[in-house]
Image: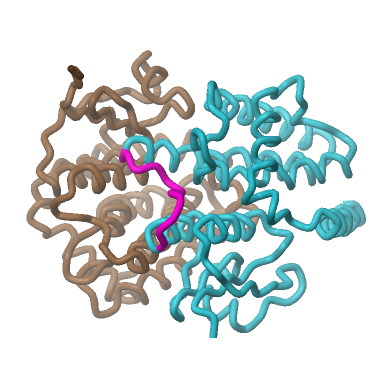
Chain colours: A brown, B cyan
Amino acid sequence: MENKDSTVKLVGFWVSPFVQRVRWALKLKGIEYEYIEEDIFNRSHLLSELNPVHQKVPVLVHNGKPLPESFIILEYIDETWKHNPSLPQDPHERATARFWAKFAEEKLFGAAWIGLCSEDDEQEGAVKSSIEALEKIEEKLKGKNFFGGDRIGYVDIINGWISYMLPIWEEVASMKIYDPMKFPAVTSWISNFREHPVIKEEYLPSKDEMIVYFQWRRKVLKGTYPPMFSNLVKKI
Amino acid sequence: MAEVKLFGSSGSPFSRRIEVALKLKGVEYEFIEEDIYNKKSPLLLKYNPVHKKVPVLLHNGKPICESLVILEYIDETWEGPSILPKDPYERAMARFWVKFLDEKCFPAMWQACWSIGEEQEKAKEEATEFLKILEGTLSGKKFFGGDSIGMVDIGANFIAYWFMLPQELAGFEVLTKEKFPKLNEWKNEYLNCSIIKENPPLKDKLTALFRARFQAVGAAK
């Protein structure tokens, strides 16, 4: 007889946008879980055990088995709990959703993060790249309530950080990427996303705490770039 | 008119992934060779306006871009041997390792090939570290996918082919039998399995391509 621990645990960090995605995904499916806060700057043995390769949050633990990486966790959640699917059923639409999630992560999130951590020419280049990416996203959202159409889904969850974290980065780093006048479809999407009955009720880090945190990150990281996005830096 | 078209390049490991997957599923397709270094075709630019890169799969007139996205699409669309496992946890782990290949192994190995001096030494160290982690997952398995090839094996094709050639041409080795016994065994199994053996990339063409790139890069340094 198998003795699986069928509880769901989420190991996270209070301000991580990657962890936030998993919170939203679990909430949208109505899945109960135990949240375990991990101080990523003072890591416990837990993260080394659960995510030995990258030692990062989020990690989802289900049936005693750990899973890292927000994109991967989101697909796992969708395949394991089949109600309220976040990805479309049609293979071509699924492929399109995966494509745009990857695009937004690499070209907007990645560039905006560099903007947060840089100044002068580097920042200018990063802001330019971010705006170009946002323009493509604007086109994608035209005439739609959410990325997939009428229902909230995978791409919305992946891009949810835009609705609450991007303005913080802009303020902290004195940069302008998202201009509501230039991006009406994105503005409409932000409102739809934030007002969604499930998203509205879910935890979000406070604005004041985020400002303090990202001011500190900017100070520490200015002039250095996370390796994952180093190929983006060379293009700027 | 072919129902399935693949815009690719025989020099691209990403493009090669798609060919392996289509052959695995027994899908007939038309291959359109793109000259990715000199002049991309208007069709490629039309079907992948965002990235303008190969591979692009065209199925019933609809384009799909990005090799990993295409691999998942192929698995979902056609019957035949599975590219991803059925179990959600195993699927997630396969996706994890193929992402590790693309975000860590490939960039480090590529950098180790094309850089010089201190940058190259650092890249070689990183590549060795990542490959060691990857090798660890092969414990007791013939392929990353178990008894037969799967997404991670297909994704790791560049380890089997492309790394061997630039290493020979550049005159250094990171992936040695002594340091990576399991990966070398995997490489041999992979190259020997029927789907790969029947459809090898043209070694001469690849060698010529790499030699040309080495010369171009060397001239620029």
Answer with left or right where residue A3 lies relative to residue B144: left
Taking A100 as reference, is A218 above or below it?
above
Answer with left or right where residue A233 lies relative to residue A144: right
Taking A85 as reference, is B193 above or below it?
above
Camera-nearest residue between A190 and A34: A34
Taking B61 as reference, is A213 above or below it?
above
Q: Position of residue A198 (x, y in %)?
A: 10, 51
Quarter of the rendering containing residue B42 = bottom right
Which residue lies at the image location 74% right of the left edge and 47% below the top edge?
B162
- Give the main secondary structure of the magenta stretch: loop
Q: Position of residue B31 (x, y in %)?
A: 64, 72
Quarter of the rendering containing residue A178 = bottom left
Q: Residue B111 magenta-drawn?
A: no
Which residues are the magenta region? Answer: B78-88
Number of numbered discs visible in the structure rendering: 0
Which residue lies at the image location 38% right of the left edge and 41% below the top edge?
B91
